[in-house]
Image: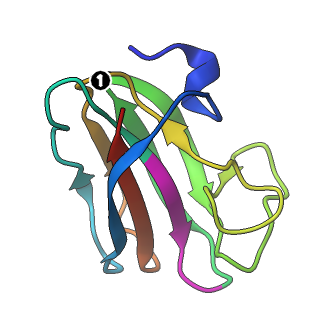
Amino acid sequence: MANWNDLFGGSGFTATSAVATITILAGATGTIATLPTPPAGQRIMLTALSSVGATLTSLTTITVGGSDIVTAVLLNGPTVAPTGANQLSIGFQAGSHPYILGGVGEIFELKTNAATSNDIVYAYQIGK
């Protein structure tokens, strides 16, 4: 797995492609998104992850390379900064984590064990 320091704001990443924001509709459950396997020698940077609007929604796990790196969180909307230890958003506003960076060849999965109460949006880049 990627170095823990790299996961939430590492260094040395050069994007080779980017994917615009993708929406997961409310009511999703289980593995709600699996990002593609990056090309040989490359890795994925999750650059955005948030609930839509000002409503929190549950996200059970963010898995990178088969390891759960974030568990039992509530996703904030893009206009609301995190206010609790179990709240998270990535890349949308002040107070959020700037990104999560996986290791070479690692796959990202977003999972929830309860139906999402709101739409979720995410975006990512692939690079070296």
Relative to 82, is 24 above or below?
below
At a point 32% along the width and 46% down the height, the residue shown is 126
Dot 1 amino acid type: Gly
Q: Where residue 113 appears, x then y in whole percent?
A: 34, 50
Is 34 in the magenta?
no
Relative to 78, is 111 above or below?
above
Q: Is residue 109 left or right of residue 120?
A: left
Q: Is residue 58 left or right of residue 38?
A: right
**Residue picked out by circle 1:** 65
Q: Where residue 46 appears, x then y in whole percent?
A: 45, 49
At a point 14% along the width and 27% down the height, the residue shown is 40
Q: Give the structural element (helix, strand or loop) at label 1.
A: loop
Closer to the camera in the image, 36 or 111: 36
Q: Quadrant of residue 54?
A: bottom right
Q: How many residues crowd around disc 1 within 10 Å: few (fewer than 14), some, or many (20 or more)?
A: some
In the picture, the quarter occupied by the C terminus is top left
At a point 46% along the width and 80% down the height, the residue shown is 118
- Is residue 31 at least partly visible in the picture? no
